[in-house]
Structures are given as structure tokens and as C-alpha cells.
Amino acid sequence: MAKFLIVEARFYDHLNDMLIAGAKAALQAAGHEAEVITVPGALEIPGTLAMAAESGNYDGFVAIGVVIRGETYHFEIVAGESARGIMALTMDGIAIGNGILTVENEAQALVRADPSQKDKGGEAALAAIRLLELQAKFA
Ligand SMILES: Nc1c(NC[C@H](O)[C@H](O)[C@H](O)CO)[nH]c(=O)[nH]c1=O
Ligand SMILES: CC(=O)[C@@H](O)COP(=O)(O)O
């Protein structure tokens, strides 16, 4: 059994609840433990992941959040920089699944957050599980 930390940026409660349900279901189905911590927004996820990974208390990680395009360029920054930060950590060998939705509107988010539809939370958890397996394979 491995210990996973789900780092969620809680910007939209109802969407995060679905994403986390999907991630937890996938982790528990694989026999793993899941803990959840909350940060203000997606831009705080990479730094939090880095701190949590440094602690040595967790085997793998799942990033959960929702970024919905608004009127300004801020969407590009939040979506792009959170993804870039997570990718940099993954390239350092940290097992992270990225379940941050970056969408045009809430309708797109609802379909992707719903575990009975596109289940992007569960998808991110499965990616983290696979990366942890590969981490052990290449150790
Ligand atoms: N607009 C969204 C944000 N914006 C907040 C940033 O992520 C960050 O918390 C702030 O700039 C302070 O550093 N975050 C989301 O997760 N989703 C959004 O739609
Ligand atoms: C993705 C965002 O930062 C967005 O929610 C902000 O909306 P706006 O660009 O209208 O300020």
C-alpha cells in the first residue's frame, strides 16, 4: 500500500468534490491511502507539492483543481504555470498525476469532473499510480 497526497486548489467546491471523489476511488481501488490538503489556487499547487515531496511522508501525489477561462490573460498564466510547475516536478522523478481542469466554461468542467463521465480525477490518480510503479522499476 502506498500513501498518496491529493493537493487540491479549491476554487469551485462542487467541481472539486467530484474530482476528489474520482481520485479517491481510483486510489482506494488500487489499495492505496489518500490524504487531502487544500491550497488557495492552482498556482499554489506546484510549490505545495514540492514541499510535501521534500517531507518524505508521501509516495505519490495527485493535483486537483479547476481553472475556467475569464476575461483576461490570467487564465493562461494560471493554467500554464501550474502545469509547467507540476511537469518540472514530475521530470525530477516525483510521481504526480495532474487533475487540474483547464476549461472554457463550467459545462466543460462538469463533464470532466464527474466520475461517471470523463473522471479526470480518477485519471490523474491512475497516472500517479503508474508513475510510482515506474519509479520503482527504474530505481
Ligand atoms: N482563476 C483561478 C485561480 N486563480 C488563483 C491563482 O491560482 C492563485 O491562487 C492566485 O493568483 C494567488 O497566487 N486559481 C484556480 O485554481 N482556478 C481559477 O479559475
Ligand atoms: C482563470 C482565472 O484567473 C479567471 O477566473 C480570472 O478571471 P478574469 O480573467 O476575468 O479575471
Image (tube, rainbow, N blue to C red):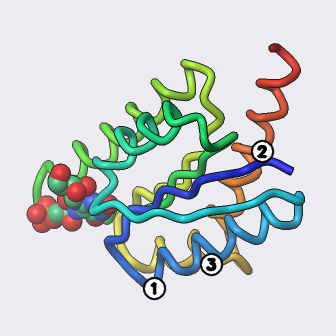
- Residue 131 location in percent, x, y? 74, 33
Q: Is residue 40 visible?
A: yes
Q: Which residue is mark 1?
A: 14
Quarter location, residue 33? bottom right
Given this view, does label 3 or label 2 mark the residue nearer the observer? 2
> At which x and y percent is residue 16?
48, 74
User: In the rendered view, would you say 113 is above or below 43?
Assistant: below
User: Going from the N terminus, do you reach mark 1 or mark 3 first?
Assistant: 1
Q: Is residue 59 left or right of residue 102?
A: right
Secondary structure of the residue carrying tag 1 is helix
Q: Disc 3 residue type?
A: Asp
| Residue 69 seen | no
Residue drawn where x is 59% and y is 71% of the image: 20
Q: Based on the displayed image, in which of its 4 quarters is residue 113 positioned?
A: bottom right
Q: CA distance from mark 3 to mark 2?
A: 20 Å
- CB of mark 3 within 8 Å of CB of mark 2? no
Residue at image mark 3: 114
Q: Which residue is mark 2?
A: 129
